Amino acid sequence: MYQVLYRKWRPRTFSDVCGQPYITKALQNEVRENQLAHAYLFIGSRGTGKTSCAKILAKAVNCLHPQDGDPCNECDCCRGIDDGSILDVVEIDAASNNGVDSIRDLREAVNFTPAVAKYRVYIIDEVHMLSDGAFNALLKTLEEPPPHVIFILATTEVHKLPATILSRCQRFDFSRIAPEDIAARLQTVANGEDFILDPPAATLLARLADGAMRDALSLTDQCLSRSRHITVDVVAEATGLAGREHLYFLSNAVHNAQVGAAFEEINRLYAASQDMGRLCSEWLEFYRELMLCKTVTAPERMIAATDEELQRLKKEAEQYDLPTILHAIDVLKATCASLALGGNKRMEAEMAALRIANPVLDDTPAAMLQRIAELESAVAQLFVEGVPTSKSTSGAAVETTAAAPAAKPDEPIADPSPAAEAPAPKKSADPSAPAATSAERPFTDWPEVLARLSSSCPPLYGVLEKTTAGITDTHIIIYTSNPLFQTLVQNGSNKSALTSAIAAVTGRQYRIGIRAEQTAESPEETDPLKSLLQKGIDGGVDVTFS
């Protein structure tokens, strides 16, 4: 009868255990020096060698001819433990024997001396599954067992164990096995089983195993059912890495706000009997891979993918920013939690696509961060490209072009006031130059301009009497909260008076910009992000006026 690889290639000595050198060395030394503890606790994720080390330790302490702390695997005790004929080594599954009665039976059995072996060894797997009563029944026996008894407890969830149990055991933490160690072990198995395993395929299997040697051997078995020559393509086909086009399609659709296309794809997958929970889980993992590609220099260490698929993921990640990816991850995490509670699964998937495509519909912190990132991008775009600022935004800069009286650019502007002496002529700046190219500074001659307006245009002076102004290379920016100013300055005579007064003081033509002074928040302002954007603009962001 065929025996699966993970059973056939289970380690038989400490030196065979893959990826746990510190633990195996410590156990070897204890056996060799005969300094054995009465209770051991092996902790680690699945497939890292806990049960294998427990069985090797049970053989080593009972071996008739130990070899430097390792069992010989040839004596009657070693062979009997391997085939289960020696009843002095008892393996208990705590998941199915988790009651008080099971532990009471164990307490009675430990009082009997071994029938054949030197020690009675109790291996309790998944010990965290024991009930509170069973743990309490085990405490005293675990603390002071008979000298011929050794307990070996194994668990994947150490946080579920009482502190009283932890304090009575010698603890060993098994780490996840490194991908390179798994790949090397798989090549050893391939040589022993006479099949061909390409090195890239072995590396991919090691990544997919996620640190578990047993998972890697099970995946290898799965690949062997398709071909005795395991390549990257065979691994991709056997493990389901191929055929992820729907994830790319959905992500691109929601990224480009094409919600209809995303809904159609979800409906197609639903009609093809695709489980919506599995779809959301795969989609969540896809965004995790994009996040790693954006943030990690060597994502191949944490992403189980072929080299070709990894390059495609890196290229796809370039189209996203981190706030967008994190927002999608949060939405899909919440969707997976909702799917576990029941309800209409297709609707949950559609709502997830809608929230990812439109962060404005989502009030989670990640969605707010996404909207802030978009507003920051819009402000940066205004600075770079010189796009006009919207006049409808509350408090935003609004400009009216003030056409000065016709004058040659190289000639000085005539002073309308006969009492004032015209300053030296200055060459007019290029009116097409963007205002954002120079820093804005206070216009210290603004009082003099107001003094000229008091005589040339008293109504306009009355509106501007208590205002201030700034200056750039091309603009005079007037700060006022009076809504009448824009109406007054649009009048031809008032506009001419203002530009003439400015030209008389500065000796050159300037374009006029209007910026609202900071006032109390408008009652109509409902979106806090618009307010944040306005604060950025009013706080000194250079904005080009047109």
Image (cartoon, rainbow, N blue to C red):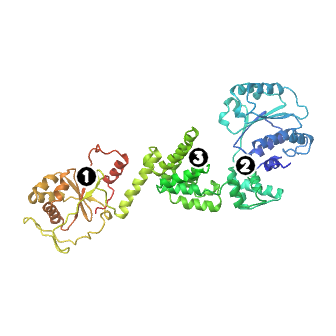
Q: Which residue bears the numbered disc 1? A: 516
Chain-order first, disc 3 or disc 1: 3
Position in image of residue 488 (x %, y %): 16, 56
Q: CA distance from mark 2 to mark 1?
A: 66 Å
Residue furthest right as drawn: 76
Q: Secondary structure at mark 3?
A: helix
Mark 2 or 3, which is nearer the eye?
A: 3
Q: Which residue bears the numbered disc 3? A: 276
Is residue 511 visible in the rendered structure shown here?
yes
Residue depicted at 57% across the width and 48% down the height:
280
Q: Which residue bears the numbered disc 2? A: 215
> Of 332 and 134, which appears nearest the observer?
332
Chain-order first, disc 2 or disc 3: 2
Chain-order first, disc 2 or disc 1: 2
Residue furthest front as drawn: 271
Residue furthest left as drawn: 418
Q: Residues within 10 Å of mark 1 (few under 14, many from 20)?
A: some
Mark 2 or 1, which is nearer the eye?
A: 2
Q: Secondary structure at mark 2?
A: helix
> Of 60 and 294, which appears nearest the observer?
294
> Of 389 and 278, which appears nearest the observer?
278
Position in image of residue 445 (x %, y %): 18, 59
Position in image of residue 94 (x %, y %): 74, 33
Which of the 4 image quarters holds residue 537? bottom left
* Left or right: 151, with 279 as reference point: right
Q: Amino acid at mark 2?
A: Asp
Q: Quadrant of the C terminus?
A: bottom left
Position in image of residue 226 (x %, y %): 76, 57
